Amino acid sequence: MWRLLRITVLLLFLAVAAYSTWYDRLSTTDWDETLWIGVFPVNAGGDGTAGAHIAALTQSDVGDIERFINDEAHRHGIRLDRPVRVDLYPEVEEKPPQHDPAGNMLSTMWWSLKLRLYARRNSHPSGRAPPRVRIFVLYHDPAFTQAVPHSVGLNKGLVGVVHAYADTQMTRSNNVVIAHEILHTLGASDKYDPESLAPLYPAGYAEPDREPRHPQTFAEIMAGRYAVDAATFEMPASLADVVVGDATALEIRWKRAP
Ligand SMILES: [Zn+2]
């Protein structure tokens, strides 16, 4: 009797989780009303450089993310006037839970649950409506941090964590990473080889039909880099050098499969 009850409760819990993931996926990619995305700055090391950088951030620093996504949506045939709205939110004091990339499936599941609870706790500043998609941007002092941890965007829970440099010269390239993680939350997959970082052909190429194929001059957003030649891959300086390719457009339902 108890065993049956326990199994029923577990199945119910799984059904609710599956339903909410399915509902989030569909409702954030039906493109019939503006999807609200919030960018929440976090001071990664608690230092003065990142603190001053965060204090100086304004809405215009995230402006090109909204412009990029909306222009690309329109290019792919979305008719909604403003498919996404990207707003800068006040700084969040609490740091997101850390992910152990070498961890097993159970530890990843536990981390993802903690991250969803973190996002729920920290995305309702007083006097502001909470956004649907929450991107937490951890700013690192570039003088102390040579390499930042991997950024992540989770479709389950509509939350992303971006590691960025607290340097105004990096704002535009930070925004490329933020846009990449936003599209992950909407169901887009990576389009580069994790070993070599090469953009995958054709899905990870901005202009797959270009003759000759190299050099490419634009990057596909989920590839993150463009191929100058078959073995040289460059990161785009800003979203002005990035496109959303057809494969990504299909995944986030800007296009339907033919
Ligand atoms: Zn990615």
Image (cartoon, helix red, strand yellow):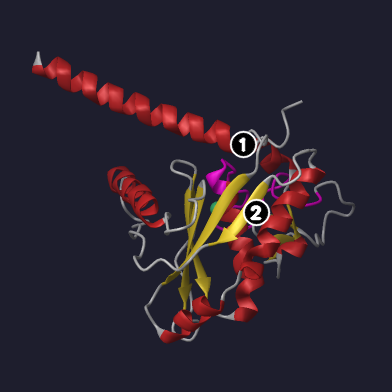
Position of the N terminus, as image quadrant, is: top left
Three-letter code for the amino acid on which mark 2 is drawn? Ala
96 shown above or below 55: above
Residue at x-position 64% and y-position 80%? 169
Three-letter code for the amino acid on which mark 1 is drawn? Thr
29 shown above or below 198: above
Do we see residue 118 in this rendering? yes
Q: Quadrant of residue 253?
A: top right
Start and end of the magenta stretch? Answer: 184-207
Secondary structure mostly seen in the magenta stretch: loop
In the image, 168: left or right of 53? Answer: right
Q: Give the percent coordinates (x, y) of residue 14.
A: 32, 27
Outermost residue, right direction? 211
Residue at x-position 48% and y-position 45%? 158
For mark 1, give the secondary structure.
Answer: loop
Q: Give the percent coordinates (x, y) of residue 126.
A: 42, 59
Outermost residue, left direction? 1
In the image, 148: left or right of 174? Answer: left
Tell me the residue that label 1 is attached to: 29
Circle 1/circle 2 CB separation < 8 Å: no
Q: Give the percent coordinates (x, y) of residue 83.
A: 69, 44
Q: Which mark is residue 223?
A: 2
For mark 2, give the secondary structure.
Answer: loop
Which circle's residue, 1 or 2, is located before the other in the chain? 1
Between 108 and 57, the residue placed more toward the observer is: 57
Q: Quadrant of residue 213?
A: bottom right
Do we see residue 196 in this rendering? no
In the rendered image, residue 218 lying in the magenta stretch gets the answer no
